[in-house]
Structures are given as structure tokens and as C-alpha cells.
Amino acid sequence: MKASYVSSYSVNLALRSSTARLQARLPDLQQEMVTGLHADSGMSLGSQTATLAKVKNDITNIERLYDTNNRVMTRMSMAQSGLKQLNTIAQEVVNAIGLTLGDDSQKGAVATSAQNAVMELTSVLNRQADGIYLFAGDNADTQPVIEYEGTALQAAFDTAFQTYFGFPKTDAATAGITAAQVNDFITTVAEPLFLGAGWTTNVSSASDNLQKARVEDGQTVDVSVSANEDAFQQIAIGSILASEFYQTEIGGEGLFAVGEYASETVATAISGLTKIQGQLGLREERVSRANDSLSVQKDLFETYVVDLDGVDAYQAAIEVNTLITQIEVSYSVTSRIQNLSLIQFLR
């Protein structure tokens, strides 16, 4: 029988190699213990890896849609808040005019209320969220409406006023303006300036087409509002006429005609605002239902991922503890072997 010799050095090398393999395995086991999923899905699943990748991609797409929908819902909620604000402002204008009809001494209060309405209307229609104009339709990167006070738009009104009546609005001659003149001025001058084609030419840069968003596969929803809605135009012309005429010397039947037109027009706008709010509310509900559906789909896909790629976290924890024990033993044995020497043996 032939004797063989094994040096402590070769044993030490073998133990080091074994320890290195154990250490290399440890991070994967620790990851599996924490995540409950295979550390290397490709190696574990083989041909099913493609299926897993597709499902994970579907989950990513769902999360992206869900996040987009949440941002859309935030914008729609802000638009709803703006519409509610306009409803309140419009009602204040109607109330102010109604309380002062026939009382020329209260013209200043109406003018102030109407001026505030014009400014608030402009502010609301130019409202932004995430850099997107909420009332611009699908022209979402352009400010929808221009300011009125002190701008070229007011200058255009002043010019039209003086051209029609033959004197500026600051002239005392405005006291003699009749109801017939007021009604004709509104029909032939003011409405063409502020309504319809005049609105889109002189006031608004918004698009009639609404911005759309894909809230779910195969489903898109209008997620914006257009500043070109009739209700906004009606608030604008009613408030501007009240603001302008109630600051002049006009009185009697002429002032009554202005107040009557302004209050009736703004009151009609209130009904229009309510309709817009209802339509927007229905779209909000569609987005919310889409998010509910996406959430259910995501849960199902995540359950499938766990079924396909999952590991027993409890078993992984046991393997981690066992592996750590083996590594500690390996270190201990390696240390002892390193301390072996002929000198120590002879001592």
C-alpha cells in the first residue's frame, strides 16, 4: 500500500476555496430572504423567464398609468375648484346688480364687484398645474386668456365706446345715454368684441379641442376644459359691461338696461358653469374607476409574479443561518490549520 502525503497548506487552500463559495452564495440567500423572490430569476425559471419579464413590464406600465392618472385627477380637481370659484364670483355680480337696480347711488359697489369678477375670471382661466394650463384645451402650454384692465383689450373697448357714442366713457355726456343706445351698443359692438369669433380673436388663445389622456388600455378621457366655453364668455362680457358703464355718469333707463343685460347674461353663465362642473365630474369618476381597475390588475400580476418567481422566505432564512454557521466553522478550521507547524508539534 502506497502512503500519500497531504500538507496543511493544501488543506488550507481547499478550505479557503470552500469558504469563498459559501460567501458568494450568502448575498443571494439574504436577498431571497428579504424579497421573497429568486435572486437570479433567469437561472431559477429557465424558459419561463420571458413570461416573468412580460408580467413585470405589464406591472411597470400599470404603475406609469396609475401615476399619470393621479396627476390628471389633481389637475381636474384644481379645475373643479376654479369652476366653483367662478360660480361664487358670478353669483356675487348678479346679487350686486340686483340689489342696486334703480338705485344709481350704489353704482360704485357694482363696478367694484364686476371688476373683481373680471380679474378673478382671468386668474382662474390662466391657472396652471405641472406647467399645464387647465383651461387651455389641448393647447396646454399657452396661456388661455389675456388680462383686461389696462391692456390693449380695454383700449379696444374704449375706442369702440367713443366711436359709437361720439364721446369717451369719462365724459359727462354719458349721463344722457338711453336704454335703446345701450342695447344697440351691446348687440352691434360689445358682443362682436367679446363673444364668439371676437372672443377667440381678441381674448382667448385656448383650443376648443380638449386635452386627452389614456387612463387605461383602450380608454381615453378628456381631462381639460376650454376657456372658450360660452359660460366664461358670458361672465366676461357681463362683468366688463357692468364694470365699464357703472363707472360712468350713466343713470336712469340707460343704467337699468346695462344692469339687466349684465345680470341676465351672468346668471345664464352660472347655469353653464354648473353643466361644465357636472361634465368634468363625470370624467373625474371615469379616471377614478380606471385607477381602481388598474389597482386590481396590478395586484393580480404581482400575485402571479410571486407564484412564478417566489421562494419560501422562511426556508431562505434557515439556509442563511445554516450558511453563516458553515462559514464561521470554516473560518475557525482554517485558522487552526494555519497555526499548525512542526515547531509547535515538537514543543
Image: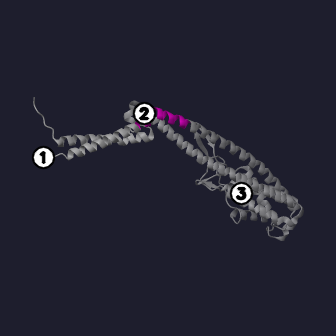
Give how far apart the Cα atoms at labels 3 and 1 are: 101 Å
Number of other residues with Cα within 10 Å of mark 2, as a class: few under 14, some 14 to 19, many 20 or more? few
Q: Which residue is mark 2?
A: 50
Residue nearest the observer in this picture, 328 or 123? 328
Amino acid carrying mark 2 in the image: Ala
Q: Is residue 69 left or right of residue 43?
A: right
Amino acid carrying mark 1 in the image: Leu
- In which image quadrant can residue 249 be found? bottom right
Q: For the point 85% across and 57% down, which residue is it?
A: 98
Amino acid carrying mark 3 in the image: Leu
* Membership of 299 in magenta stretch: yes
Q: Are the residues flagged by discs 1 and 2 in contact, CB closer than 8 Å? A: no
2 or 3: tag closer to the N-terminus: 2
Q: Which residue is mark 1?
A: 346
3 or 1: tag closer to the N-terminus: 3
Asked if residue 63 can be seen in this view, the reply is yes
Give how far apart the Cα atoms at labels 2 and 3 are: 55 Å
Please name which of the two marks, 3 or 1, marks the residue nearer to the observer.
1
Residue nearest the observer in this picture, 273 or 45? 45
Please name which of the two marks, 2 or 3, marks the residue nearer to the observer.
2
Q: Which residue is mark 3?
A: 121
- The percent position of residue 222, horizontal first and vertical second, equals 64, 44
Q: Is residue 100 left or right of residue 333?
A: right
- The percent position of residue 311, horizontal first and vertical second, equals 43, 35
- In which image quadrant can residue 185 be found? bottom right
Q: Which residues are magenta?
A: 297-316
Secondary element at image label 2: helix
